[in-house]
Image (cartoon, helix red, strand yellow):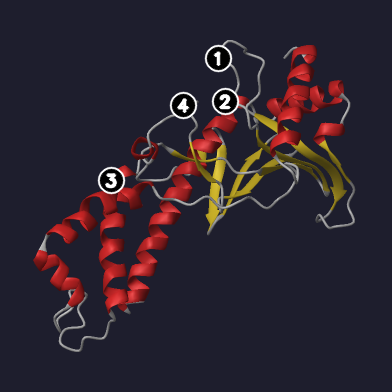
């Protein structure tokens, strides 16, 4: 990759980051994004149907003693609990219908995948070192921005939800680790420029044993431009290329979506009382 082009691009990306993120991209805390695209579907269909149908309205206002959840004549649930379960039932169906990946892969581009709740670890063993990538899918989802600022609200609800987490890349040799904190760049690369990167280095550190707060780290945007390019080339040689990071985003999106559906199902079971 051309060092001059990449360095110039990094300067432009730094300007974008500084103007759009007050706290800087190094921050590990990401702002939650409200997920409302399927909620909008439910309100446009089911809730309007209930408003126009007297029997459905009476169901919510004067529910019978028999719940569909299985509690029978005991009527253990409040009106709010019944409405929540009814909504979740519709929401889960809509989310499963929108789910693109039904079965999560166990490998991504040669990296073995291990999930633990919201945490994901990808590992690949090379000749003399271990390449380990870790990320957390919490608060990483946003809608794809297609550059259409005047899109009607009802069309925006159907924009694809994408997970683009900040991720850690550790190159482990013995008890020494060269660590990188990376994240997706805010501005998408130009289709006509093959040198544009879709991710950048936020932080670099080197430590023995486990990382702790005493370990020195340097921000990526203050590194010498040529050194930054060399480190990006090193990551590419270890398998962390633009193509791989795009696949990482695809996997993270599918993983987060699956976790979201599991959460909805868990809330429904909790509300019903079947844990």
Q: Mark 3 — residue?
A: 97
Question: Which residue is painted at 78% across and 17% down in the image?
Answer: 8
Mark 3 and mark 4 in contact? Answer it, CB < 8 Å.
no
Q: Mark 4 — residue?
A: 148
Sequence-first disc among 3 and 2: 3
146 relative position to 5: left or right: left
Nearer the camera: disc 1 or disc 4: 4
Cα–Cα gap, marks 4 and 2: 26 Å
Cα–Cα gap, marks 2 and 1: 14 Å
Q: Which mark is residue 191?
A: 1
173 relative position to 152: left or right: right
Report the quarter where the C terminus lies: bottom left
Where on the picture, by quarter, is residue 101?
top left
Q: Mark 2 — residue?
A: 243
212 relative position to 192: left or right: right
Sequence-first disc among 2 and 1: 1
């Amino acid at each position: 990759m051309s060092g001059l082009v990449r360095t110039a691009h990094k300067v432009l990306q730094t300007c974008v980051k500084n103007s759009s993120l007050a706290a800087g991209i190094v921050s590990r805390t990401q702002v939650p994004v409200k997920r409302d695209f399927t909620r909008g579907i439910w309100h446009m269909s089911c809730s309007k149907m209930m408003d126009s149908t007297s029997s459905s309205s009476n169901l919510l206002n004067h529910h019978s003693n028999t719940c569909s959840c299985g509690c029978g004549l005991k009527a253990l649930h409040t009106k709010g609990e019944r409405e929540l379960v009814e909504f979740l039932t519709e929401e889960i169906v809509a989310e499963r219908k929108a789910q693109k990946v039904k079965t999560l892969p166990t490998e991504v581009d040669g990296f073995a995948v291990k999930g633990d709740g919201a945490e994901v670890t990808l590992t690949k063993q090379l000749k003399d070192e271990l390449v380990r990538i870790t990320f957390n899918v919490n608060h990483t989802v946003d809608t794809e921005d297609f550059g259409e600022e005047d899109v009607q609200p009802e069309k925006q609800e159907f924009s694809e939800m994408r997970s683009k987490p900040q991720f850690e890349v550790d190159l482990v040799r013995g008890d020494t680790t060269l660590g990188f904190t990376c994240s997706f760049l805010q501005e998408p690369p130009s289709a006509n420029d093959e040198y544009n990167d879709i991710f950048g280095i936020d932080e670099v550190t080197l430590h023995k044993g486990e990382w702790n707060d005493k370990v020195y780290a340097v921000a990526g945007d203050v590194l010498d431009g040529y050194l930054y390019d060399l480190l990006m080339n090193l990551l590419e040689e270890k398998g962390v290329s633009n193509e791989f990071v795009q696949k990482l985003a695809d996997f993270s999106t599918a993983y987060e979506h699956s976790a979201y559906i599991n959460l909805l199902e868990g809330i429904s079971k909790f509300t019903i009382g079947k844990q």
